[in-house]
Amino acid sequence: MELLPRGVVVIAGGGPIGLLLARVLSFYGVKSKLFERNKTTTKWPKMDLTNARSMEIFRKLGLADDLRKQGVPPNIDQNVIISTGLSAEKPLTQWDLPGVDRFRSQIQNTNDGTQPQEPWQRVSQAIFERWLKKICDDDPLIDLNYGFKIEHVEEHEGFAHTTIADVDTGERTVVRSDYVVGCDGASSRTRTSLSIPLDGGPIPSCALLVHFKSRDLAKLHKQGRFWHIFLLGQSGGFEGAIISQDEMDTWTTHLFLPLDAEPEKIESHHAVYRVLGGLYEPYKFQIDEILVRSIWRPNVAVTHHWRSREGHVFLAGDSAHQNIPTGGYGMNMGIGDAFDLGWKLASVVNGEGGPGLLESYELERKPVALRNVERSHDHFKVHKELQMLLSGGDPRRVDADTEEARLLRQRVHEFYQSHDGENRDLGIEMGYWYNSLIILHQEDDGSEPFSDPRCYTPTTWPGGRPPHLFLSDGTPIFDKFGKHWSLLCFTETNVGQDYIVQAASDLGLSLSLINLSEEAQARALYERNLLLIRPDQHVAWRARAVESPAIVDAVLRTVSGRIVMGIRKAVSEDASLELK
């Protein structure tokens, strides 16, 4: 048995979530040992958009600018085309989505708190993983072990025991650690070892993915430059999609099929031509190289529990939740998992946080997963509705030069333009609130604000991500936040901030005091004089004033997980303590 030093975290799985978790732990000074059954990073394209909230996280970690160098150039927009096939003269409609430059201009010109700090970034997961692995390889706090598979995980006498096997020799080793995080995907051995069930499962269909190279841009861009094209099939339903991975020569198609279709018998070139042919004959063009192909089944599932019974094992990413690709929530949800769990584990290991932090992980992240899985299904239903719009005859009639066709195309256009949230739903990405025992509410917080999946509504309601805006000198307010905890103060008057700073020092809690009393716009958006911001940029607590050192101590102990109960219960024994 290999006995790891106290505080070293074992990570099962070296995909994007496992690698990112290792980096988050390192960012906060904690060592990790990662095991991945494959000998290198993925060849599969998988995810192709790192969303705006994820890019805010990468900025916090100091990685955003370097990640952008790996992806699609910022000047290229990312149109999404809805098409009956590339043989048609023009698409049915399209969503005009901005590239990074246009999105950044939108953010700078809309300084009202509704926008993210960072635009999204297109980058294939195959590239993303290689980039992140190199960063982790160079990090002295991260020990990467590729070519070792996880066979079993269990809790025993206050530790986690992980059985690993060398994929070449079969030699087994048991590794003992304080904590294990299963980032080992949808078929997670970590999850199955602990007999944690899933709610949900596969959708009764399958897809044939073909990843290929082609420079035949004249034919591929026949209906215009694109990021995605969603295509109808011979049945008149949504049956395929193509993704431009790098705006040069790398593409991925997905051919959606019934379960009995025997996709293994469909030749790769023909699958690509069939997708792009849409309602018509296969659309042929020059394919230079087939890179990889695979058959996959869409899953919609969320695990019952995200941590083990004794609290030494956690699940993150696809091991905890799986959803269909529409909306791009899968890996981006996993990024949120890694950031949330990473700072909490580091706080506990470093002695700044108590067990309540780790208990809060499932309470905070599982509702986000449930919400996003449901929203992803809503996006998928938009494409399914297209078949209904074209029912009542030959679906190819929509491309005819007739008045009926023009009216039908207009209906399709209006429907898609009014249901275009698939990559625009900032409310889903940023407008959620954590609700756990380490989030504190005041009497004057009132009712929880309405959460619109479409739009992010600026609010500092505890548990949520606060609004981004540029301060009077042009500095993004998030860049003022500290690495650890931050206390934002929007008044020169002493309303208890000195108590908070002193209490944090007494508790050994790393806290940055940020005085923004001269920032009128920020003060209006942030709604209170005092706001306590967690390391993950979420609001832990807010108040107009606090007058008692005792209540400050209780607040800090609660938000840092040292009191595993609500603040009102914690202070109810002393009637002299009142929240302000």
Image (spheres, rainbow, N blue to C red):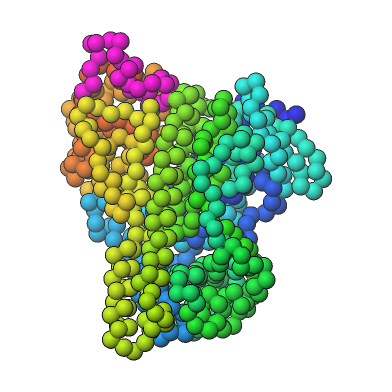
Residue 405 seen in the current view: yes
Quadrant (top left/top right/bottom left/bottom right) for the N terminus: top right
Magenta residues (range): 555-580
Find out whether residue 579 is within the magenta segment: yes
Residue at far front of view: 392
Residue 470 seen in the current view: no
**Relative image position of residue 163 (x, y in whole percent):** 71, 35
Which residue lies at the image location 39% right of the left edge and 56% below the top edge? 378
Residue at far bottom of view: 401
**Relative image position of residue 291 (x, y in whole percent):** 64, 69
**Relative image position of residue 319 (x, y in whole percent):** 56, 44
Vertical arrangement, residue 377 with respect to residue 501, above or below: below
Which residue lies at the image location 56% right of the left edge and 65% below the top edge? 258
**Relative image position of residue 483 (x, y in whole percent):** 42, 37
Is 572 on the left or on the right of 203, as rendered?
Answer: left
Which residue lies at the image location 24% right of the left edge and 41% below the top edge? 449
Find out whether residue 533 is within the magenta segment: no
Q: Quadrant of residue 148?
A: top right
Question: Which sits in the foreground, 144 or 204?
Answer: 204
Q: Quadrant of residue 528?
A: top left
